[in-house]
């Protein structure tokens, strides 16, 4: 039956969507058994991305056969920051499988990139030699490795060109802007700027009268998977960090603008905003199952919130706008009322240290603690008279304030402040001058080596071709009015 191509394809898609750390090695073995190359590639990719987590479990990797473990340990895409972790996985596999031939153990160890070890790894390497397995069967190989390191060379069989991809991985702030234009990835602490591909959208039949800035809703899962929903259509994507491309998923059920998206326990929730045709506020809540690649409707909002922010923690989904906050319990499929924010504006919200931080009427910042069920005010943010928008993001266990302001001519400026909880104040950590910054931002772990150059985000000194009019700046600030059309998201502050 599996010889039928359409059945093979359906089976591959079904199992790919259900990959997790408990079954990925079993799915890899299944794919090998039935010679399903697509499924095998997906399983190997999942194992590579979650390699450290699998190493902690150990048992799953040890169930792979000789050829399979060699293929995994040889991958450039292993998400590890040092080669000793690959070596430890190889030793674990050899010890668990009790190979009859020492030559097979050597072949597995040759997948380790020994030339990447430095003098800092000397203690680790000496520790390997003390292991009974190495003493009994592999001392010759380890002595050869040590001799080669001392003489600046390595055995020919272990010569490989590159670090693993995880060596360069780091948290970056992502700015999502206009359709069909690259997204900017920015590390404020190293000033590294890269370019992320955007999904291609056909804008020819959408009839937009001017530049659209709030084009996407985006969220990141705890597994660091990026999901992107179009505000211009029902399209929905997941990001492939190795290929720097977007894979389209099942189309959403409802078209909506000025909405938000949040991740909770293997599902994504799309809610809020307005109907793009009738301009009515939406109560419907769409729920996407990652395993099923399917959208369904769950309990609707008790109130049409319009523009709001989503935050998830403690197995609950929090939806907050300037007037009220609701809490969704997925197990009971119900919405509960929580302590209201009650402010004139809500610019942005994010979760930091198990609390919800909200940018309200500038410069006010309010923090909600679910444990205490109450709001409190913290230190005011710095005010920029030329600010176009303010955002808060959690980045590498830090809370950052991003202020995008108009500099001059075609240049914008992003100013980054870090919150100091001990002093209850914001301190400047970085400033970048560039040609464009998207309105939506978040922080995610990226592979810079897989991203494009960020040079295009820097404005040329003598380039006067652009102007502030190109960027629909009036749509980048919140308005006090509670009425108006959805043509500009400045009207959506409900």
Image: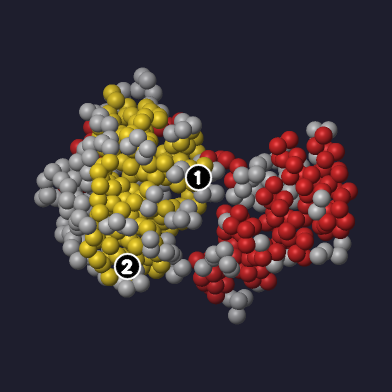
| Mark 2 burial class by Cα count in 10 Å: few <14, some 14-19, many 20+ | some
Residue 368 versus residue 398 in the image, above or below: below
**Tag 1 residue:** 446
> Contact, CB < 8 Å: mark 1 with mark 2?
no
Residue 48 image-quadrant placement? bottom right
Q: Which circle's residue, 1 or 2, is located before the other in the chain?
A: 2
Q: Which residue is mark 2?
A: 329
> 95 or 426, which lies in front?
426
Relative to 482, say whether 291 is above or below. Answer: below
Q: Position of residue 420 (x, y in %)?
A: 37, 36
Evaluate whether residue 445 shows in this view: yes
Towards the viewer: 118 or 339: 339
The figure's colour scheme reads: secondary structure
Q: Position of residue 198 (x, y in %)?
A: 41, 46
The correct choice, above or below, for 274 with respect to 472 in the image is below
Q: Is residue 488 visible?
A: no
338 left or right, relative to 173: left
Identify which residue, 411 or 430, lies in the foreground.
430
* Residue drawn 73% across the image and 48% down it: 112
The answer for how far apart the CA atoms under marks 1 and 2 are is 31 Å
| Screen quadrant of the N terminus | bottom right
Judge by depth and name the residue closer to the eye, 327 or 75.
327
Q: Residue at x 80, y 53 (%)?
A: 131
Observer-side mark, 1 or 2, equals 2
Spot occupied by residue 9 in the image (x, y as percentages of width and height): 54, 69
Secondary structure under the numbered disc 2 in the rendered image: strand
Quadrant of res 253: bottom left
On the image, the x and y values in percent for residue 274 come to: 20, 57
């Amino acid at each position: 039956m599996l010889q039928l191509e359409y059945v093979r394809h359906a089976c591959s898609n079904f199992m790919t969507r259900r990959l997790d750390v408990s079954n990925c090695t079993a799915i890899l073995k299944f794919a090998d058994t039935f010679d399903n190359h697509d499924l095998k590639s997906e399983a190997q990719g999942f194992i590579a991305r979650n390699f450290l987590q699998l190493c902690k479990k150990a048992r799953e990797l040890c169930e792979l056969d000789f050829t399979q473990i060699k293929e995994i340990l040889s991958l450039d895409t292993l998400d590890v920051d040092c080669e000793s972790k690959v070596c430890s996985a190889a030793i674990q596999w050899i010890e668990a499988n009790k190979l009859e031939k020492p030559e097979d153990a050597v072949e597995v160890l040759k997948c380790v990139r020994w030339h990447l070890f430095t003098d800092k790894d000397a203690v680790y390497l000496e520790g390997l030699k003390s292991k009974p397995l190495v003493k009994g069967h592999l001392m010759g190989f380890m002595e050869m490795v040590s001799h080669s390191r001392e003489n600046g060379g390595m055995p020919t069989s272990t010569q490989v060109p590159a670090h693993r991809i995880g060596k360069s991985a780091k948290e970056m702030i992502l700015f999502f802007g206009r359709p069909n234009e690259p997204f900017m990835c920015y590390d404020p602490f190293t000033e590294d700027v890269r370019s992320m591909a955007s999904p291609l959208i056909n804008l020819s039949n959408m009839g937009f009268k001017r530049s659209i800035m709030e084009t996407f809703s985006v969220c990141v899962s705890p597994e660091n998977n990026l999901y992107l929903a179009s505000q211009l259509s029902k399209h929905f994507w997941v990001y492939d960090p190795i290929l720097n491309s977007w894979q389209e998923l099942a189309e959403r059920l409802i078209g909506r603008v000025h909405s938000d998206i949040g991740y909770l326990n293997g599902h994504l929730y799309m809610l809020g905003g307005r109907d793009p045709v009738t301009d009515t506020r939406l109560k419907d809540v769409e729920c996407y199952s990652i395993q099923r690649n399917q959208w369904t409707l769950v309990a609707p909002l008790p109130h049409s919130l319009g523009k709001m922010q989503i935050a998830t923690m403690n197995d609950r989904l929090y939806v907050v706008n300037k007037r009220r906050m609701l809490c969704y319990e997925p197990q009971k499929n119900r919405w509960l009322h929580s302590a209201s924010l009650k402010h004139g504006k809500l610019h942005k919200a994010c979760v930091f240290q198990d609390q919800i931080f909200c940018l309200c009427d500038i410069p006010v910042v309010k923090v909600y603690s679910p444990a205490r069920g109450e709001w409190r005010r913290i230190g005011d943010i710095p005010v920029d008279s030329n600010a176009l928008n303010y955002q808060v993001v959690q980045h590498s266990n830090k809370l950052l304030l991003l202020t995008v302001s108009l500099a001059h001519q075609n240049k914008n400026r992003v100013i980054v402040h870090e919150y100091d909880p001990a002093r209850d104040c914001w301190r400047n950590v970085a400033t970048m001058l560039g040609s464009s910054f998207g309105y939506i931002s978040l922080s995610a772990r990226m592979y810079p080596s897989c991203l494009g150059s960020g040079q295009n985000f820097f404005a040329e000194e003598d380039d006067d071709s652009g102007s502030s009019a190109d960027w629909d700046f009036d749509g980048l600030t919140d308005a006090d009015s509670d009425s108006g059309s959805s043509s500009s998201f400045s009207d959506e502050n409900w």
